[in-house]
Image (cartoon, rainbow, N blue to C red):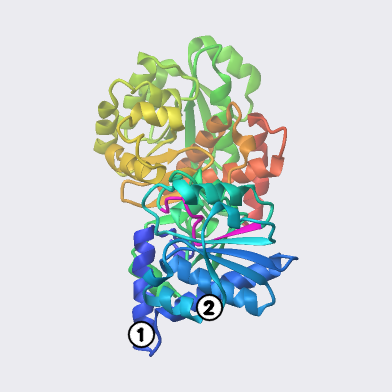
Amino acid sequence: MTNKYAILSTEQMKTADDFAIADLISRGHGGADLMEEAGRAVSRRIIGAVNGNSALVLCGSGNNGGDGFVIARHLKKAGFIVTLALLGDENNLTGDARLMADRWNGEIIPIAPDIVTNCDVIVDALFGTGLSKYISGNLEETLIQVNDCEALKVAVDIPSGIKGNSGEILGAAFKADITITFCRKKPAHLLYPGKEYCGETLVADIGIDDRAVLETKPDTYENHPDFWLGEFPILKSDGHKYHRGHAVVVSGDMISTGASRLAAMAAIKSGAGLVSVSSPDDALSTHAAHLTAIMIRKQSTLNNDLKDHRLNAWCIGPATGVNGNTRQAVLSIIRSGKKTVLDADALSVFEEGPLELFEAINKSSDCNCVLTPHSGEFGRVFPYLKKLDKLTATKNAAKLSGAIVIYKGADTVIASPDGRAVISSSAPPTLATAGSGDVLAGIITGLLAQSMPAFEAACAAVWLHSECAKKIGLGLISEDLAKEIPAILQELNI
């Protein structure tokens, strides 16, 4: 994976900072140079975005506050009327923050709710990633006043009050229109509710190079085609349909057939050479009335079908029912060694005994199983992980289950048992509609059928799913999604 899209935890960012500072010192410079560059980058963005010339800069006593002193100095130099408010005692400032405070030649006033008056821009340089306790009292009241103000609100690194590794709100938080971070994004920029408080997140280059990022050993990334496109199935000029795999989607009974057809259509639109629906006898005629390019197989022959090596990727769960038949079919599919996508009912059916599922997955060869829970399903299968932040919970779920886990939502997290993870937060709210998850399951199955590695297939499917939704816009229904897949693939120049 390219580290251009690496997401760094607050601990990893400190490692990158320390590496960069050590490198600067070896060349006769110091950490103050990074702070100066960070403050300059933010001030340039503010000057280019604000029509007025009055600014309120809120500074903390640490390095984020030091950035704030630099920003205030550059804004004043550019002609802004700057009010600088400090949280804490100026005499307690140390290190580079002390140095930057000494370079500020204006007044320093204490932070209080009544300092928030009419101004054009408010800069949050209070805590950045350095906050570990809940905000309350005087500062909470000040942030409430700030958030009600109509000024452009700019956060430095991470909005104060947001936990950097999880996006959790610690009591109260600065609600930014723009957040300017440095080097790489942090989890809070992509995970809710933190993402909502960040507004538009911009990454500024302040001279921390890729060597510093590599020093952190990044294992979490923002979803982007650059790091899975190399594994995407490519059509061969001399290929035929069997080269592209045969996906099978297991259907529910006669009154629960639509979900499997949504998944099957998504699988074939994603490039699978052949796709079948495995149907109960009472639903055969229903499927036959709706399907043309999709074949139909009798579910009564499932055990024999699992012995057919050509039927290489299976999807089960969309409307199959939370019952013993679904549970047994899931275990049979996994134990047969097939590439498998487990969605919806195929997950909920293991609420009372998920360890049997995990044991079956871990005993199967390779990592060819993908779980696609939403929040409720995740809580049923991984009840002891639900209390953790989403990124940590998903990583732990993948390690425990032995599967690729896609924890769906506005901030979808995809994790592999080997520790890699991807955050995908570009999904539009229109995807919150019945059946969209069935389409996602089908896209993954179609990519698995074409022998795309499971982790990359999961990441690609989540991205494709979101892009299809963006293209449709308002009025989206799940039946529309698969129709857009070819156009998105065309845009990728595959």
Disc 1/disc 2 C-alpha distance (Å) = 24 Å
Instruction: Magenta stretch: give its range.
Output: 152-164
Under mark 1, the amino acid is Ile
In the image, farthest residue toward the top: 282
Determine the secondary structure under disc 1. Answer: helix
In reply to whether residue 154 is colored magenta, the answer given is: yes
Question: Percent x, y for residue 117?
Answer: 66, 56
Quadrant of residue 362 in the image?
top left
Relative to 398, say whether 380 is above or below.
above
> Residue under circle 2?
104
Identify which residue is drawn at 52% across, 77% down: 37
Q: Quadrant of the C terminus?
A: bottom right
Crowd around label 2: few <14 · some 14–19 · many ≥20 (10 Å): some
Residue 29: horizontal and vertical position, in percent? 40, 87
> Residue drawn 30% across and 37% down?
401
Question: N-terminal of the two: label 1 or label 2?
Answer: 1
Which numbered tag is attached to residue 25? 1
